[in-house]
Image: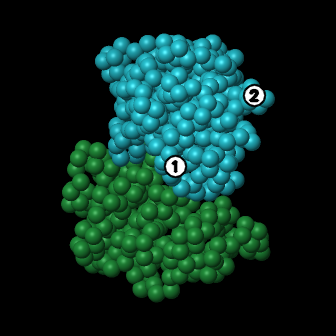
Chain colours: A cyan, B green
Amino acid sequence: MMNILTPRPNPIVAALYTLRDLDVDVAVLHGPSGCGFRAARLLEEDGMKVVTTSMSEEDLIFGASDKLIEVLKEIDELFSPKTIGVVGSCVSMIIGENVKKAIIDSGLKDKAFFVEIHGCMGANTRGAIETLKAAMDFGLIDENEFQRQEKMLLLATEVESNSGMAKSKYTRPSRGADLRTVAEYIVNLLKDKKKIAVVLNAKKETAYLFADIPLAINLASKKYGGSIINVCNLSKIVGLSRIKRYAGDIINNYDSNGITIDYISGGLDEYPIAGKNAIEYLKDKDFDLLVAVGIPQALPILNKESIAVTNGPREVHPLEDAGYKYVTVEIASHSTVMGIRDIVLSELGEVIRDVAGIQ
Amino acid sequence: MKQIAIYGKGGIGKSSISSNLSVNLASEGYEVLLIGCDPKSDSTINLFGGRRIDTVLDLYKKGITDPNKLIFDGYKGVKGVEVGGPAAGVGCAGRGILVALKTLNKDYYLEKGFDIVIYDVPGDVVCGGFAGPAREGYADEVYIVTSGEYLSIYAANNIVKGLFNLNVKMGGIIGNMRNIVNEEQKIESYAKEIGSQLITAVERNSKIHESEIEGKTVLEKYPNDPLNLKFKEIGNKILENKKSKVPNPTTDEKIRSILGGLY
């Protein structure tokens, strides 16, 4: 297996995000105070409490089960949570902390469960799968839902290896194409009465931001003409209740803006297959430009002029290599979407509005 | 000044050799520091009449890190330190050794003018932490204690593999015999096989165990016993040893062939 040098997503962070998806109230990271701090802070903005056990050098040597028990009792008193997820860290797992026993000894085994993640190694989806498995064993989700999500996560790993940043040994980051150039290109096509297929293939909460680009293109079309085929992975019947809620929020916004979705390609956690569904739907349709936003690397390549909008500077080069005319990046896609219930402005969406003269 | 580390199979007598060696060198006027690196904290017990001294890591936990307070005066003026560590089955003893060595502050104790610093290391070098005393800046050379028994030499050879990988010099082998046939010859043949030497071999002697029952070294319980001369001999050979070099580990088959040829 190729040793990838590019910094990769992290299974511990994926575990924390999955606990958030499961509407767990508090995540306890059994590790040092700085463990996963960026993700932890973002997740707190999204409503889930994230605490660490502040493991010290001394705890690493002597073990920190007592500290974990104490922290569990403290958060139970402070936050009165219904469910608590305890996630391991490199430090606590290397020394073989007996987390399950600590949970039992804390007296909170009916509300706390352990996600056994060992370190930042391997695919980040491993962290999500382990969390879902632990949640299934704890009774938060049923086996069907676990199997469905496990399949999606394994497919997501495949997408990253085949078409994303895990494709090469080292992938340079890039800010992609100039937003004004891309916005002008799109708006001019609409002024020429051309037809644009817009595919929203977003991952979970990032949809709140990526959905703004189809919105801006539709608003520009309302002003200048042309026509739009809207394909979105906004199923309201697939996935965890939290994920379905995101889809519902975005559809409400589209409804209020008079935007019709032509085809629902799947749910917001189905981006690894929803991209394929979208292209399957579009392959016989007549249109002049494809705009793929969110996880464009999950879309099979169409022999059409295409623009991709991605969430990571390191996805730009692989997408350019795949043949996209323009690739742009929404750099703040993870940080601006926490704790919200409506579409937020995207960078490209704002420039499209500006070029089209709409607000 | 010389820094040495004593390695060998668990239970083979490293601590007995280290503590008896230490007091005999001290009785000849040398300044000796014995650093026990086993989480069981029993390397120096015979320097203190069977009393366990406070360990570096226990004191560290209490916020005491002044090197002066981590080193204790033992029998014949030998200075004793115990690294300490977690209870069995929890935490990370290897990390403990590294943190304790850092807390002890090598620069500090090396300036104290010791003639010899002895690191008595746990039997099984199971992780990087246990190799800490053999790393650059700590022991100048490593001595391995072994009997002539297969498992003991097999364990010694595993340690030799580690020394080879870490590019650490080995001073030689100290035999601690268990009364098996041609034992000294067996140990010596193995030493030659790995490109090292037998420093000396200590006969099995109940006086060592009798002394230890009282928490003493042989020098303290039987001051005039000739066994003490043996430990002085080991100590002086170590201090004068100029033949240390990185050893070459051998194969399991070769060990069996050496031992099998000497029934």
**Which residue is more in the foreground, B255 or A173?**
A173
Q: CA distance from mark 1 to mark 2?
A: 28 Å
Task: Give the letter of the chain under mark 1.
Answer: A
Residue B141 in the image: state x and y as whole percent. Answer: 46, 76
Q: Residue at x 35, y 47 (%)?
A: A57
Which residue in the structure is indicated by mark 2? A285
The three-letter code of the residue at mark 1 reads: Gly
Task: Give the letter of the chain under mark 2.
Answer: A
Sort mark 2 into few (<14), some (14-19) or many (20+) by Cα contacts within 10 Å: few
Residue B165 in the image: state x and y as whole percent. Answer: 58, 70
Question: Which labelled disc corresponds to residue A176?
Answer: 1
Please determine whether, in this image, residue A261 is positioned above or below residue B126.
above
Which residue is outermost to the front?
A192
The three-letter code of the residue at mark 2 reads: Lys
Question: Which labelled disc corresponds to residue A215?
Answer: none
Determine whether, in the image, residue B41 is placed left or right of residue A7: left
Determine whether, in the image, residue B52 is placed left or right of residue B126: left
Which quarter of the figure is the C terminus of chain B placed in?
bottom right
**Which residue is more in the foreground, A41 or A60?**
A41
**Which residue is more in the foreground, B233 or B18?**
B18
Which quarter of the figure is the N terminus of chain B placed in?
bottom left
Q: Secondary structure at mark 2?
A: loop
Q: Residue at x 58, y 57 (%)?
A: A170
Residue B128 in the image: state x and y as whole percent. Answer: 50, 58
Residue A247 in the image: state x and y as whole percent. Answer: 55, 18
